[in-house]
């Protein structure tokens, strides 16, 4: 019985983790795969920011970097249109 409850929590967590919030900010683990929707590595992501392929981050604090959800949605929509 306890195993079934744990499985339900894991499914809820994994499905909720792959969905972007409607507005606000999202941190890097919520953007990059396997949890996030963009299947690139951290080094590719940061190189893409430097090249201008990916949106620039917003500093929320001295050690907190995040991205606007709207920018990430725009990036995903643009990649879908390129296919």
Image: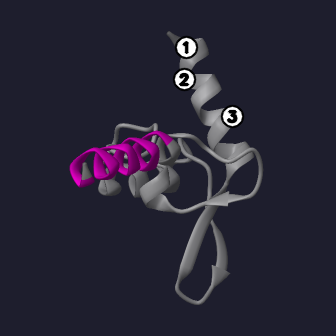
Q: Residue at x 64, y 25 (%)?
A: 77
How many other residues sit within 10 Å of disc 3, few (<14), some (14-19) or many (≥20)? few
Name the residue carrying label 2.
79
SS of the residue under disc 3? helix
Q: Please state the horizontal and vertical placement of residue 71, each as a whole percent of the image.
A: 69, 45
Please give left or right for residue 33 compared with residue 77 in the image: left
Q: How many labels does the image show?
A: 3
Please give left or right for residue 47 compared with residue 61 in the image: left
How many other residues sit within 10 Å of disc 1, few (<14), some (14-19) or many (≥20)? few
Q: Please state the horizontal and vertical placement of residue 56, each as a whole percent of the image.
A: 62, 57
The picture quadrant where one finds residue 73 is top right
Give whichever of 61, 24 is nearer the camera. 24
In this view, 43 is above or below 82: below
Name the residue carrying label 3.
74
From mark 1 to mark 2, how far is it between C-alphas?
Answer: 5 Å
From mark 3 to mark 1, how far is it between C-alphas?
Answer: 12 Å
Q: Which residue reaches farthest top? A: 83
From mark 3 to mark 2, how far is it between C-alphas?
Answer: 9 Å
Task: Report the magenta residues as a range.
Answer: 2-15
Name the residue carrying label 1.
82
Please give left or right for residue 4 compared with residue 70 in the image: left
């Amino acid at each position: 019985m306890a195993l079934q409850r744990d499985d339900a929590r894991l499914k809820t967590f994994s499905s909720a983790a792959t969905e972007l919030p409607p507005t606000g900010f999202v941190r890097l683990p919520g953007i990059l795969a396997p949890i996030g929707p963009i299947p690139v590595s951290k080094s590719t992501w940061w190189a893409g920011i430097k090249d201008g392929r990916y949106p620039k981050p917003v500093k929320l604090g001295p050690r907190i970097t995040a991205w606007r959800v709207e920018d990430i949605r725009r990036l995903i929509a643009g990649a879908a249109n390129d296919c």
